[in-house]
Image (cartoon, grey):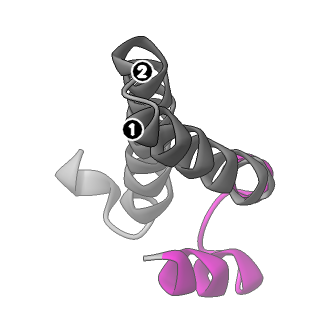
Amino acid sequence: ISEQITKGCEVGAIPQTTCDKYRAFGLNFKKTYPLAVGMWEASRKANDKATQGKAEDVVRSLVSDMSKLANEALGAFAPEVK
């Protein structure tokens, strides 16, 4: 999906505001996801269920945000489907 969104942004098929949000999300994802995975792995090894749950919440939030942005961006290709 990222490749299609990037191409859509490059050719102007996706609104610039959506492209800007997607780009900002990507930068945040690249920093946040590895930290959340590391936190999850460390908490699993330590049998710290509370921290493990917090790491899972971070990943779920990233997935939710990514899904919303992808839907917004790809909706530019087929606005009548919305």
Query: Would you say the residues marked 1 and 2 are in contact, meaning their CB atoms lie under 8 Å apart?
Result: yes
- Which segment is the magenta one? 2-26
Residue 27 visible in this rendered orientation of the protein: yes
70 or 38: nearer the viewer = 38
User: Measuring 34% from the left and 55% from the top, which residue is drawn there?
Assistant: 79
Q: Is residue 65 magenta?
A: no
User: How far across and how far down the image is residue 78, in percent?
Assistant: 31, 65
Q: Is residue 13 magenta?
A: yes
User: Measuring 48% from the left and 32% from the top, which residue is drawn there?
Assistant: 43
Q: Main secondary structure of the magenta part?
A: helix
User: Measuring 58% from the left and 42% from the top, which residue is drawn there?
Assistant: 36
Give the structural element (helix, strand or loop) at label 2: loop
Kindly give the residue lying farthest to the front in the view shown: 46
Report crowding for label 2: few under 14, some 14 to 19, many 20 or more residues within 10 A (C-alpha). Answer: few
Instruction: Kindly identify which residue carries mark 2.
Output: 48
User: How far across and how far down the image is residue 23, in percent?
Assistant: 76, 59
Give the structural element (helix, strand or loop) at label 1: helix
User: How far across and how far down the image is residue 51, in percent?
Assistant: 49, 19
